Every structure is written in C-alpha cells, then in structure tokens.
Amino acid sequence: MAQYIYKSATELASLIREGKATCSDIVKEHLEQIKKYNNQLNALISIFEEEALQEAALCDKEAKEGKFRGPLHGVPVTIKEQFWIKDKKSSMNFKMLKDFVAPEDAIVVDRIRKSGAIILGQTNVPRNLLDYQVSGDIYPEGKNPYHTDYSPGGSTGGGAAAIAAGFAPLELGGDFGGSTRVPANFCGLYGLKPTEKTVPLHGSVPLPKNSNTFLVHMAQAGPLARNMEDLELLWKIIVGPHESDRTSPDINWRQPSKNSLSDYKIAWTDGWPGYETSSQISQAMKSLAETLKKNNCIIEKKIPDETLHRESLKTWGGLFPYVIAQGTSWFVRAIIKMQLFAGFFKGFKQNSPELTRPMIEGFKMHANHYGRVMLQRSLMTQRWENFFKEYDFLICPVAFGPAYKRCKTGSKLSYDGKEMIYANYVWPYVVCFNASGNPSISIPLGLGKEGLPIGVQIVGKHWSEPELINFAKNVSVLTEGFVKPNGY
C-alpha cells in the first residue's frame, strides 16, 4: 500500500530529514504511480526513471551523513516541458522544434535542483503553449484526472494533471495567458503567477535554430501544488534575481503585516463587463464572499471601473504578437496569425473587433506601434496599482465555468445555457493580469456539481506575494481546497 503518494512536499522533506523515510522509497513509489496511471492521462511525456533513482540513492547517502542540499532534499517534482533541462529535448509539442536539445538547465530548473529536488520527468503541453487544452504535433492528448473527457487546462495542463493524480507533489509551470492558474483551476490545485520580472526566464522556452531575439513580456514561471505551504516553498526557491538576467530586480520582500482576515480589505467580482460567469461559479464566489464577511473580513463587490479590464485585454492582444512571432519573416507571421484566427481565436474578429485590431497591428512588428502599446501598458498598470491602494486584494473568476470537454480548438463552447466563442470561456478572465503583471493565485473551492473542480483567483499589487500568500492561506482554511480525484 502506498505510503507517500499525496503527501505534501513539506511532509516528505520532513520525513527525509527526520530519517523516517528514504528518498529512494519516496521516488520509487511516485514512479510506480506514474507507470500505473500515466497512460490514462498522458500527463508526463518523458520519465527520467534511471536518473531519478540514481539521484535518490545519492540523496539518501548525503542524508545519512547529515548533509542536505536544500528544503526539497530528495523530494520528487515534475517540470513543464517548455523549460530547459540540460541534454533533454524541449519542443513545446511543435514539430518545428522537435529536435531542440537544451544546452543547459533553465535558471529556475537549476534552482530547483540545488534545493535538493529530484526531477521525475517532463509534463505535457499544447502546441506552442497556445491553448487551454493539451494537444499538439508530437505528444498524445493530455486529459483531466477528474474526468478524462475533459481538458486539464493549458498550457501547464500535463503538470496540473500529474500533481492532481499523485505523480509528484510539485510542478514548475509557466503563465503567459493563465497557463498556471487555469490548469490549477481545472485540476483543483493551487497555482501562482508571480509578479512579472521577479523570476528569471532564461531557459524558459526552446529557441528556433539561428534565433537572435529574446523579447519577453507578460510571461512568468510559477509553481503548482496541492496546498499553499508547498506553493510558497517552491516560489521561494525560484524567485529572485540572477547575474545573467538584469531585468529581475533584487526586491526587498516585506514580510506579511496582517495576521487575520479581519485585517484585510477585499474587493471581489463574479464577472467583468461583457464577461459574466456561469451561475455555478457566481454562486460559489458569493458564498466565499459571505464566508469571508462572517469571518470579519472587510469585503465588497467592486471593480476598478468599466474600462480598465477591457484596456487590459487590448494591451495583452497588442503585445502578444511581439512575444510569439519575434524574429520571423512577414510570411511566417501571416501564417501564425491565420492559424490563430482559425483556431484559438476563431470568431474573435466578429465577436470582439476592438480587441482584434491591436493584435493584427502587432503582427506587423512596427516600432511605433510597439512603443504605443508599451505606453498603454504602463498607464494601464498604474491604474491597477491605484486600485490596490484602496483594496488589499481582488477576488475574481478564473473561467466562465469548470473544465470543458476536450474538443477541436476553436469550437464554440456551451455551458450553463450560454454559447460562446472558444477563447471567451477562459481568456478574458486571466490575461488581464498577465497584461498588468500583477501576481495572482488560483485557489480551489472543492468540486462543483459535475464532480469537476471549481475555484477563484486572488490578485494583489506588484511585489505583494508574501502578503498574498498569507491571505490565500487564511482563505484556504475556509474552503474545501484540493479534493483527490477518484481512482488515483
């Protein structure tokens, strides 16, 4: 009978340090869990069994000598396939990158290794990381452990499925358009998108041959876990500047200044102008707001104004092409744009023309347009920061509803009696905070009426992670939190 599956990373690390468990036994048990269930979920696309067992044996030797590498000594983790792992392939599930082999570890992967963690394998992603499902050119389709007919979310969908199914207690994910928060939400986990530019991004994506550009905006690496303590632990390991990355400032992180829910003033909303949520999500959020109020939290339903959310979406759309199509010819950019509007953004031109225009303009790669979008972003971000001068945090939806059934990308989605274009089920609720750069934590509220996880996200001002994590811990005590999927 399994002893270590579904124990937290914090628990496992303590057992190892106290001599109550060996790294080898813990790693072997998790590898057995993967062998038993991965073919049902396609959560991992590579498994480093031999290396993991060798590393576990070495960690056991060091532990017996009283030597511990760091807080995750001997603890198994999984890594999203986009991040470089030295001498391992990284393709983003895209045939044009199928032969890319990482020349070194990504900075975040190196930090995880130095913490003592043992990497079990790489997790599945959608093609080019551009979907809330997990399918692409190379790997089999990823599935949700709560119901395999449903999407596990994207783009860290394989990682979310892996953690929910007990393959490891921690996953390193990345978030450019909700790619950590959405899979966490669809698979009942906690997921953090840190403040932009606080986690170094070198080695965060495979690079095309002869690539000579590296323009990154709105993306950030972040952890997924089954509880807040583990989420905080991995965040502390990966955060902070690096000598090779001058864009990550050395921040003097302030310790949480508030102890109880009564110390916080919170805003919440169950939707945005033009983007309401399903009755199930709305009711769950109202219930959470009432629970927080009963626990003496100052909370009111409030959004900044009628235009800021829309401006945030326009900013994301305007910057998006510069990140995904940089360094390519006009012909390649035209193909990328055509594929997006025939797939992920199908129906977008007709449904949201004012959001489509900045994106189409961005694909032209004009310096003046880029400058205008960056100015727009600066002004928009300041408006969000002004809002957080009045409120500590904002609680808002991650998606219109719970995970949706796996389908062809671009299909219209229907839930709770409402039909919508594909992107609008999730995209408008999450990319606003990639555009603004604010930190956000997705937290689970338990299972909804279909037996699928539901949750919310909590957003804070820039560099508020210690307080945001502290508040999320207080909230998580009042919710059902992570619920293990049946059968695993």
Image (spheres, rainbow, N blue to C red):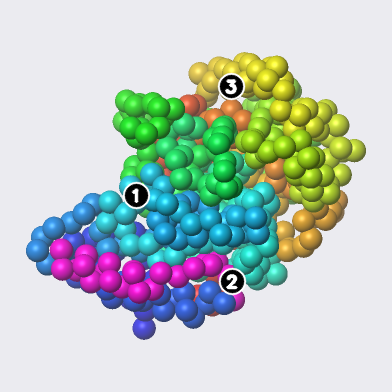
> Residue 418's spot in the image, x, y percent?
84, 50
Give the residue drawn at x 73%, y 63%. Answer: 405
> Residue 100's spot in the image, x, y percent?
53, 56
Gap between marks 1 and 2 measured at Cα: 28 Å
Work out which quarter of the rendered image holds the N terminus and state it: bottom left
> Residue 85's spot in the image, x, y percent?
42, 55
Residue extending farthest front:
210
Identified by mark 3, the residue type is Thr
- Asked whether residue 487 appears in the rendered view, the answer is yes
Tell me the SS state at disc 2: helix
* Span colored in magenta: 40-62
Gap between marks 3 and 1 measured at Cα: 31 Å
Tell me the SS state at disc 3: helix
Residue 478 relative to residue 451: left or right: left
- Judging by the rendered image, the residue that carries numbered circle 2 is 41
- Judging by the rendered image, the residue that carries numbered circle 3 is 381
The label on residue 172 is none
Instruction: State which tag comes first along the sequence, 2 or 3.
Output: 2
Give the residue drawn at x 83%, y 49%. Answer: 342
Identified by mark 2, the residue type is Leu
Relative vertical location of residue 388 with respect to residue 269 in this rendering, above or below: above
Residue 10 relative to residue 19: left or right: right
Image quadrant in which you'd find residue 143 = bottom right
Taking depth in this image into account, of 246 and 373 the one nearest to the observer is 246
Identified by mark 1, the residue type is Asp
Gap between marks 2 and 3 measured at Cα: 38 Å
Image quadrant in which you'd find residue 240 = top left
- Judging by the rendered image, the residue that carries numbered circle 1 is 110
